[in-house]
């Protein structure tokens, strides 16, 4: 993590040097858009979760 | 030294008038005059109850009610004259009543004391003030919610230890503040239950031998409960402390938000543009657009925290029941309410009108390895133990 490249810019081989068994699917978790989409837990920043929160808050603050 | 027998609270027990310096030192009219609406409402309810109990005639009650209503209008219109010699708002209003009604006015204070009177007035005032703050909190929550749709596709860095941690959607930030403000509202609602208890008729400390009906005045003033013990009523300022604490958490939350947005508005961050209507310039540096409103919201938090501290120390070790020290409760709590309401009134439009610099934010999101934890969890889902994945990604 000392280089100035982002994780998504690294070639697959770089990951495989330290983490054997890693494959192309790793790139589905890299980059901030993919990272955000990867969240699943309740109350997380996953788009589905945030959409639920927004809907709930709209209902809560409506007069 | 002028020594006149000039205070209506001084009974026939006094042979000497009060020293003028004492008048100035002990007066509270300079700050408790804002209780006039509550004081008059309490007195009208008290006199109605006295009439119900046969202690006043209906005609006497009607004269008192009419005259107190006239006095209230004079205060609203700025025509009422204040005088330090009359000490506080209660004596001012009662003196004005007596000046106009004579002995009928002198009957008003039957079965009560200034101790329960001030507690009643202050509880009524705090009850209304809590409702005002709750409404302002809701306005700020609405402001945050109103941004959510427009910012739903904007990703911001979340920070821990002020270092980039993980990526989050901008509405996740906005709704985090809504959650904090909701707890603030809940705390106020809960505190309000204990504020909304009637002490009227507990008199000075032990109650009264007059056949009053405390339930009647509680009902007329909209109190939900009656404080059961006159010693407790005379000494209790828990409702002041609780309110001050509720206001402190609001101020702390606002200070966190203000600090965050001050940082985000710097050239170094450049995450957002504050509306210029809510910024000020520098007298010497022409390029400066300063976030003074946010800085003052952050700074005024100190007053609210300080007021809570002062109130805690004020009530520490006070023996039962009423002590004159308690007069010092009002300036602090008034200031905390005024400060928090003023901050909330400015926070809502600031939240609504600030613009996120989406392109600027996006251009630097690949810095700081915001996706490192997602990579680690990707490896965990592939069967790698968490500690091993944590170590490998860090490498």
Image: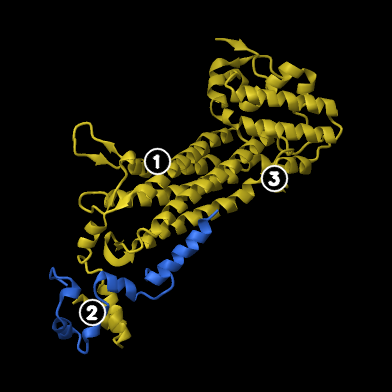
Chain colours: A blue, B yellow
Q: Position of residue B336 (x, y in %)?
A: 48, 40
Instruction: Specify the subunit that label 1 lies on.
Output: B
Q: Is residue B51 shown left or right of residue B42?
A: right
* Of marks 2 and 1, the one in the foreground: 2
Mark 2 lies on residue? A27
Residue for badge 1: B300
Camera-side residue of B119 and A56? A56
Q: Is residue B239 visible?
A: yes
- Where residue B266 is drawn, which disc sits there? none
Label 2: element kind: helix
Q: Residues within 10 Å of mark 3 (few under 14, many from 20)?
A: many
Judge left or right: residue B253 versus residue B68.
Answer: left
Q: Tell me if residue B12 can be seen.
A: no
Residue B16: x %, y % from top left: 65, 14
**Label disc, if present, on residue B223 of the rendered structure:** 3
- Where residue A18 sits: x, y (%)? 17, 83
């Amino acid at each position: 993590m000392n280089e100035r490249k982002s994780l998504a810019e690294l070639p697959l081989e770089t990951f495989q040097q330290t983490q054997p068994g890693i494959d192309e699917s790793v790139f589905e978790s890299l980059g901030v858009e993919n990272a955000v989409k990867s969240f699943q837990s309740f109350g997380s920043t996953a788009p589905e979760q945030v959409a639920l929160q927004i809907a709930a808050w709209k209902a809560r603050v409506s007069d | 030294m002028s020594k006149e027998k000039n205070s209506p609270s001084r009974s026939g027990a006094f042979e000497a008038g009060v020293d003028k310096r004492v008048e100035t030192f002990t007066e509270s009219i300079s700050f408790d005059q804002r209780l006039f609406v509550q004081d008059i409402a309490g007195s009208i309810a008290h006199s109605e109850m006295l009439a119900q109990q046969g202690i006043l005639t209906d005609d006497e009650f009607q004269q008192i009610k009419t005259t107190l209503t006239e006095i209230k209008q004079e205060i609203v219109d700025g025509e009422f004259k204040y005088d330090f010699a009359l000490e506080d708002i209660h004596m001012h209003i009662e003196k004005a009543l007596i000046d106009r009604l004579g002995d009928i006015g002198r009957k008003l204070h039957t079965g009560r004391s200034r101790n329960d009177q001030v507690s009643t007035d202050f509880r009524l005032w705090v009850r209304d003030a809590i409702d005002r703050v709750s409404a302002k909190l809701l306005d700020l929550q609405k402001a945050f919610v109103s941004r959510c749709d427009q910012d739903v596709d904007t990703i911001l860095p979340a920070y821990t230890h002020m270092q980039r941690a993980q990526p989050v959607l901008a509405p996740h930030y906005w709704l985090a503040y809504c959650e904090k403000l909701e707890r603030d509202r809940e705390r106020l609602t809960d505190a309000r239950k204990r504020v909304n208890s009637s002490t009227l008729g507990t008199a000075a400390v032990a109650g009264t031998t007059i056949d009053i009906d405390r339930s009647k005045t509680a009902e007329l003033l909209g109190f939900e409960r009656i404080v059961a013990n006159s010693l407790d009523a005379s000494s209790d300022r828990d409702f002041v402390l609780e309110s001050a604490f509720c206001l402190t958490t609001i101020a702390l939350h606002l200070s966190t938000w203000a600090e965050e947005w001050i940082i985000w508005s710097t050239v170094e961050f450049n995450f957002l543009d504050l509306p210029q209507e809510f910024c000020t310039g520098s007298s010497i540096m022409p390029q400066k657009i300063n976030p003074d409103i946010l800085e003052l919201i952050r700074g005024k938090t100190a007053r609210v925290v300080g007021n809570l501290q002062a109130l805690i120390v004020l009530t520490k070790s006070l023996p039962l029941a009423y002590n004159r020290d308690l007069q010092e409760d009002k300036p602090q709590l008034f200031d905390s309410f005024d400060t928090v309401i003023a901050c909330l009134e400015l926070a809502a439009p600031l939240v609504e009108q600030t613009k996120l610099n989406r392109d600027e934010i996006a251009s630097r999101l690949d810095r700081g390895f915001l996706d490192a934890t997602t990579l680690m969890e990707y490896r965990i889902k592939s069967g790698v133990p968490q500690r091993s994945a944590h170590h490998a990604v860090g490498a």
